[in-house]
Amino acid sequence: MDAATLVIPPPPVTPLRWEGDPLTGALLMLDQTRLPQAVVWLRHTGPDSVIEAIRRLAVRGAPAIGIAGAYALALAARQEAAQTAPVESFVGALEGHAARIAAARPTAVNLPAAVARHMRLVQGRRQSPAATAHALFEAARELERYEREACAAMGRFGAAWLWGRTRFLTHCNAGSLVTSGIGTALAPIYVLKASGQAVHVSADESRPLLQGLRLTAYELTEAGIPHQVLADGAAASLLRSGAIDAVITGADRICANGDVVNKIGTYGLALAAREHGVPFMVVAPLSTLDPHTACGADVPIEQRPEDQRAYLDARALPASLPAYAPAFDATPAALIRCFVSEAGVIEHPDKKRLKVWLRAAARFR
Amino acid sequence: MDAATLVIPPPPVTPLRWEGDPLTGALLMLDQTRLPQAVVWLRHTGPDSVIEAIRRLAVRGAPAIGIAGAYALALAARQEAAQTAPVESFVGALEGHAARIAAARPTAVNLPAAVARHMRLVQGRRQSPAATAHALFEAARELERYEREACAAMGRFGAAWLWGRTRFLTHCNAGSLVTSGIGTALAPIYVLKASGQAVHVSADESRPLLQGLRLTAYELTEAGIPHQVLADGAAASLLRSGAIDAVITGADRICANGDVVNKIGTYGLALAAREHGVPFMVVAPLSTLDPHTACGADVPIEQRPEDQRAYLDARALPASLPAYAPAFDATPAALIRCFVSEAGVIEHPDKKRLKVWLRAAARFR
């Protein structure tokens, strides 16, 4: 199957959207904590509410967080530019905003990287605050466009590699809800379907926050793709039954040696896939690659109060309940059959094979 | 550590208890679907409510279901004996009850086995219905006593094998709540603690029905044992971190080749334990062994409406949501470091090593 002949469908959902012109418009954001029960759009006109939304997972997924952070920086510049202050204090204030935005989530590299990259566009230049705000807005819009095209490319490359396989298992949500396009892990599946192939998706519910049950099932329903959910612990038995042709996940960060940091549960899933000879594909844009992190053990893993609360809610008890609740785990490169990015496919990834991509990823730092 | 010198503590919870004399008494049963929010005792004076309680998982776990079934049979005989009918129609009616009791749950072998065994005590004998009812009551009481002593023996053998290890990971609930004693998987941990060793338990929450979160955490709190819960998908990462000295589970059925049928999620957990060299111990009474099932692939796996509903509840959507929701999975014998039963310990189990236990298990058929 030639990747160029595959069909790219429109995204089933678009979680981030700029409304209006740069000077008076706002960032619209789908509140993913409310899905699927309610479709609620947040309207951001300043950086603080975006930071809060990133923190409480209203927007989630490495590419979408990066885009949201870029728009937050543009909103911060617009807000500061509206004050009548000298340029020096404008830049100082903006740097303060940038630091707060970059620190809103610790695991994904996209967010601090996008903020630092966009700040370099304006630092050391003697331009008016208004011009800076406009440049940051254009940079955010360009990032949004880039990630959309990256999704299409990942969809094409992934679908070409998967062609002929029809039954997929995925973990967490790495679809259009985490990007400005057709997603990462789900992109190849959307492309396969749009190109005429039958597809079926099994979605791990992904405890504790149930992104698979709440978000992937929602998104697949919007896309008209037949699917079923399962408890994370049932994946090994499903793989053993021979009902899955490939496992596909996204990534929050890919380390220099190919280790993949992704939603808690990915590592155990990869072990089970290897046991049953089912290929494990990781789909993520180059911006997810982190040349500065040698391996998975070096990544700080978030321990979030939301995850702790999820256990208490499920038990419906007010008492405290000690929980081991890491948000992510690290999957060794050796368990991964192939990486897909907008640059193509790398099979059996290791440090050497990743070298070209790591160089390409430097443009996102 | 000599198993004989270990201390057996009282069970932290006793989920089944006969109250009163055989003729007028009742079976008290802790409703485990209400735990931990409410401690509700059901009072059974006839077989039908016991069957319903078994079906809706108010009582659960292979040994406890067997005991409940045995008492249900005694209650059925008492109920029929109270009618003024000829002995032949009494036996026929009792056989009808026995068939319904045995069919209340399909996976655990204990329930149909206990019912069939106790029916053989009365079939073909010309004794009065009242004498039959009394014999079945005594048989149920004897089974309850046997399982309690079996728990103590499993606790001793398991604790002796584990001595020196302090950090355990378990799946689902296989504690005092599933037996008439100190449990199966948790029995060695209770014995270690009572014998003066520090212990800490990590409990998989065990989706979809959250037995770990609801029941194991409840039971460990009652027992005063420090513990934490985790999402099933986090177990692989916890094992990788080196924080676990042994994984211990119960079993719903052990096949002739040593394959273990247990709560969904056990298989993936066993794969992760092997990957990290953490011993996987299965603790179950001999009554759980099934010489007539060659291997795990031969066991009918329940697909229960409760499990399906658990997904809908979590998503809080009334719509239908297709789910892959097997209640159990099968773990190959090759992944199990040792079996513990009331007969002792078998390391690296296989068909040959299990032969003596399989012969001993015949007495439960």
Image (cartoon, coloured by chain):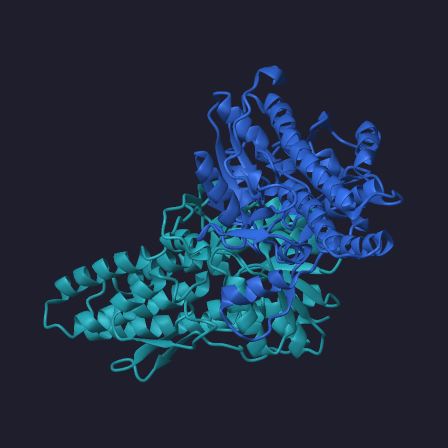
Chain colours: A cyan, B blue
- The location of residue B224, given as percent across then percent down, is 43, 34
Q: How many marks?
A: 0
Q: Quadrant of the N terminus of chain B?
A: top right
Residue at 60% from the left image edge and 32% from the top image edge: B278
- The location of residue B195, given as percent across then percent down, is 51, 21
Query: Does B79 sit left or right of A354 as displayed?
Result: right
- A189 or B47, which is in the foreground? B47
- A361 or B111, which is in the foreground? B111
With respect to residue A212, does A25 lie above or below? Answer: below
- B85 or A299, which is in the foreground? B85
Is residue A132 in sight in this rendering? no
Q: Quadrant of the C terminus of chain B?
A: top right
Farthest-out residue, front:
B84
Residue at 77% from the left image edge and 42% from the top image edge: B131
- A125 or B72, which is in the foreground? B72
- The location of residue B231, given as percent across then percent down, is 51, 49
- The location of residue B337, given as percent across then percent down, is 69, 31
Query: Does A234 sit left or right of B352 as displayed?
Result: left
With respect to residue A71, does B190 lie above or below? Answer: above
Residue A66 figure quarter = bottom left
With respect to residue A181, does A237 lie above or below? Answer: above
Residue at 17% from the left image edge and 59% from the top image edge: A92
Is residue A76 in sight in this rendering? yes
Query: Does A123 sit left or right of A114 as displayed?
Result: left
Farthest-out residue, right:
B124
